[in-house]
């Protein structure tokens, strides 16, 4: 019987923080109490916070490990192991790796690494090599002519937990300013003005010719498999209306307050990146996550591209006026509900013992220990 007790901890429950003890047995939370434990074997947490393990439903971080530099592809298994170490040390015990299905102008190599990325994650999971619980978030580029073929080969994988449909063509959503988008691509990809314009024209053409049908087909395939469907970078009320018609239940990274308000009114879960919280705004000049949180138009944080920002973002929201349990829910219970994971996401009797011990040092939350299903993994 695997049993341990954490004592003298500030335990962050779904709606309050209590100073007390928590008992874990056979991978599950058995009980918690608002008083210290008298057991000699209890772990004294010295007043540190104990949170539910964080649940990250959108991180592109795994891609950085597969493509550490332009033109460099890293060993797939080594890449996923390195990513897992970064994720678990950030207090994330369940992670939905956002794997691009189809290429974008920014990262043309995405199509090449799709298969190796999925296979490496699948292999590492099968050999019990990972400390976090890894799932797949298939982020489908509707402007890629091969997106349906690429997705059809993966849609029945048991690791797939979320499907999102996205259109990164300029003139709308994340990049309404075409001139600014052109400048960014010229600088990033070392293109000539003519090369950038040619690629932009092709992308915008694909958006209006094949994009709508790809979006509808991908949505139908996801819904037929009971996979949560997410829209992406919605900028208008019309974007939200379309997402609702297609069956989306998650609105990822809305770019305007109007879109966020429409999504909230229609019952969608709203996701924003925690780097946006930490930076105090969007790097693209879109609506800020803090503004949405303060207006009640945000209920889920995702690490997006910096794993540790998920924990830091929750604590920053608490520092600027949000209740700490509410902020932590954005990175634990609320994402669990959005992806239909009822066995985790909060400190409650009978839930998985996914736990994170955190100490605040100069207003910075620092991960001291992590348990996944009752096993200490960090």
Image: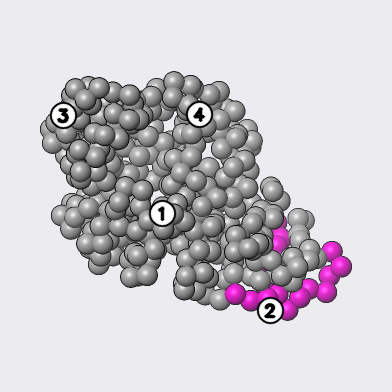
Crowdedness near tag 4: few (<14), some (14–19) or many (≥20) residues, C-alpha within 10 Å: few
Dot placed on the residue nearer the N-terminal end, 3 or 2: 2
Mark 1 falls on what kind of element?
helix
Residue 46 vertical placement versus 113 (above, below)? below
In the rendering, which numbered label is found on residue 276? 1
Q: Name the residue under label 4.
A: 68
Q: Which of 137 and 49 is in front in this view?
A: 49
Dot placed on the residue nearer the N-terminal end, 2 or 4: 2
Residue 373 vertical placement versus 45 (above, below)? above
Q: Mark 3 points at which residue?
A: 201
Crowdedness near tag 2: few (<14), some (14–19) or many (≥20) residues, C-alpha within 10 Å: some
Spot occupied by residue 292 in the image (x, y as percentages of width and height): 34, 64
Question: Is the Cβ of the residue at disc 3 closer than 8 Å to that at disc 1?
Answer: no
Alpha-carbon distance for marks 1 and 2?
Answer: 35 Å
Alpha-carbon distance for marks 3 and 2?
Answer: 62 Å
Spot occupied by residue 223 in the image (x, y as percentages of width and height): 29, 47
Q: Magenta residues?
A: 17-41
Mark 2 falls on what kind of element?
loop
Dot placed on the residue nearer the N-terminal end, 3 or 1: 3
Q: In percent of the image, x 41 and y 54: which residue is there?
A: 276
Alpha-carbon distance for marks 3 and 4?
Answer: 29 Å
Crowdedness near tag 1: few (<14), some (14–19) or many (≥20) residues, C-alpha within 10 Å: many
């Amino acid at each position: 019987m695997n049993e341990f007790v954490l004592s003298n901890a500030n335990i962050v429950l779904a709606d309050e923080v209590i100073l007390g003890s928590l008992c874990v047995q056979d991978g599950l939370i058995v009980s918690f109490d608002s008083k210290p434990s008298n057991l000699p074997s209890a772990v004294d947490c010295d007043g540190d916070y104990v949170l539910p393990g964080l649940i990250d439903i959108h991180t592109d971080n795994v891609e950085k490990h597969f493509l550490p530099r332009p033109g460099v592809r890293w060993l797939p298994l080594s890449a996923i192991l390195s990513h897992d170490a970064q994720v678990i040390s950030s207090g994330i015990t369940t992670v939905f790796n956002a794997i691009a299905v189809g290429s974008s102008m920014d990262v043309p190599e995405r199509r090449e690494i799709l298969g190796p990325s999925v296979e490496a994650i699948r292999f590492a999971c099968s050999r019990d090599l990972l400390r976090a619980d890894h799932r797949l978030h298939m982020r489908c580029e509707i402007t890629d002519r091969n997106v349906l073929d690429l997705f059809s080969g993966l849609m029945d994988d048991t690791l797939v937990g979320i499907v999102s449909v996205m259109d990164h063509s300029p003139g709308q959503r994340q990049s309404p300013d075409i001139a600014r988008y052109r400048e960014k691509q010229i600088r990033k990809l070392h293109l000539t003005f003519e090369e950038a314009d040619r690629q932009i024209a092709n992308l915008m053409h694909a958006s209006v010719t094949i994009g709508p049908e790809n979006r509808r087909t991908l949505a139908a395939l996801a819904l037929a498999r009971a996979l949560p469907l997410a829209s992406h970078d919605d900028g208008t009320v019309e974007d939200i209306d379309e997402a609702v018609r297609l069956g989306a239940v998650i609105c990822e990274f809305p770019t305007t307050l109007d879109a966020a308000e429409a999504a909230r009114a229609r019952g969608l879960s709203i996701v924003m990146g925690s780097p946006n919280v930490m930076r105090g705004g969007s790097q693209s000049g879109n609506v800020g996550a803090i503004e949405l949180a303060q207006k009640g138009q945000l209920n889920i944080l995702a690490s997006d591209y910096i794993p540790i920002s998920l924990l830091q973002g929750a604590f920053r929201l608490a520092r600027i006026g949000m209740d700490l349990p509410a902020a932590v829910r954005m990175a634990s219970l609320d994402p669990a509900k959005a992806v239909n994971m009822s066995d985790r996401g909060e400190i409650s009797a009978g839930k998985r013992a996914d736990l994170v011990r955190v100490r605040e040092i100069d207003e910075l939350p620092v991960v001291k220990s992590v348990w996944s299903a009752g096993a200490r993994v960090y």
